[in-house]
Structures are given as structure tokens and as C-alpha cells.
Amino acid sequence: MIEIPSDLHKDLVPLAFLLGDWAGAGVHDFPGDEKCNFGQEVSFTHDGRDFLEYRSRTWVLDNDGNKVRPLESESGFWRVDAERKVEVTMTRDDGVIEIWYGELADKKPQIDLVTDAVARTAASRPYSGGKRLYGYVKSDLMWVGEKQTPDVELRPYMSAHLKKVVTPEDVERWAKALPDDLPDDGIAFFK
């Protein structure tokens, strides 16, 4: 269910499907790195201004699904204009800062992004750009990332399937929004 908060900046309504806390797992595979399964927590929040704040943390998972060690962390800000063009500024823990541009798909909650600018610290590993695809599919958030380096052509390297994290406050808010005239037995509700 996509909710549009009353205090969400009007320009951000097309990005409302991203809002909330998400958690799930995915696969990381890039030449020169350890191939692994990873866990991920993502948060998209807003404070009434014309951007979403984004935070993501990932960690390597062992074969039993237990956290082994951190993998990547990133944070940034997402904006969208009247023509459904999306811009993202992102900082990653490995010393990379990126500017991404893309657009919302027509009539579906999907965003295609490509890097426009990449800045790296001296300590960061080689990286020259990437692409990402985010999609809201059957109430889940799914994404795939591609990256390239001077030695490796653009190729997929991470993807994840995330579920919306439901809080007790969400359940209470939804319960209060139910109509007062629900059937008592539950069976009549489905007739």
C-alpha cells in the first residue's frame, strides 16, 4: 500500500512509493570482490522540504543468514521535477561521491538512474560510474545496480529484494482508518 503523507512536499508525490523503512537481502558479485549474499536496511524519509533523505546499510551474510561484517553504506538526497526527472546525490563509505540522473517510468513506480559525476578520495577503489534500477513490485522494493571501473565494463554487481518494515505505529494508524461498520464475524467481510 502506498501512502502519501499530508506533509509530503507536493513535488515528491511521484516518489512516495519509496517512503519508509525497508529490509531484505540480495546478492553481491563483482570481479575482484568476494561473491556473497548480503542483508540490507534502507530508509527513505522526508521533512517537508523538496527532497527525500536516503540511507542504506548492507552487510555480508553467512550461509545461515547471520551478519558477518559490514559491506557498504551510503546516504543521499533524492529529488524529482515536474517532468518526472530524478536527481540523486549520494555519498558512500568507500570514499565515493556520486550524482545520479534518471527518470520515473511512465505509469509505473520504477526509476532508472545513471551516474553523471563521480568523485573519489585517494583511498577509494577504482570506480568510474554505474546504473541503477529501482522498482515497486507487489508492495516490495526491488533494485539492481551496475557498475564499471577502468578495468571492468559496466555490469550488474548488486541486487536486492526488500520488504516494507511495519511498525506498531503503522498497525495502529491502519486500524484507526478502518471503517466503523465492519462485519463482526469476518466471514461476511469476504461475501
Image (spheres, rainbow, N blue to C red):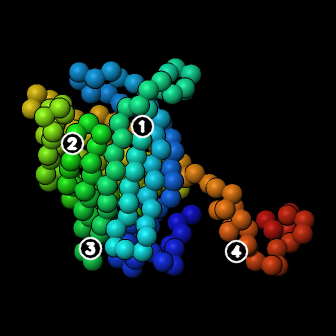
Which disc is residue 58 wearing? Answer: 1
Q: Which residue is mark 2?
A: 96
Which disc is residue 177 wearing? Answer: 4
Image quadrant for the N terminus?
A: bottom right
Asked whether the beta carbons under mark 2 and mark 3 sit within 8 Å of each other, the answer is no
Comparing 70 with 82, the one in front is 70
**Where is 163 relative to 61, above or below?**
below
State which quadrant residue 129 falls in. top left
The amino acid type found where label 2 is placed reads Val
Question: Disc 4 vs disc 2: which is toward the camera?
Answer: 2
Q: Residues within 10 Å of mark 4 (few under 14, many from 20)?
A: few
- Of the image marks 4 and 2, the number of the one nearer the N terminus: 2
Which disc is residue 81 wearing? Answer: 3
Q: Residues within 10 Å of mark 3 (few under 14, many from 20)?
A: few
The amino acid type found where label 3 is placed reads Asp
Asked whether the beta carbons under mark 4 and mark 1 sit within 8 Å of each other, the answer is no
Question: Disc 2 vs disc 3: which is toward the camera?
Answer: 2
Residue 108 in view, yes or no? no
x and y percentages locating residue 119 in the rendered image: 14, 46
The amino acid type found where label 1 is placed reads Thr
Give the distance between the C-alpha atoms of the residues marked 3 and 1, in whole angstroms. Answer: 29 Å
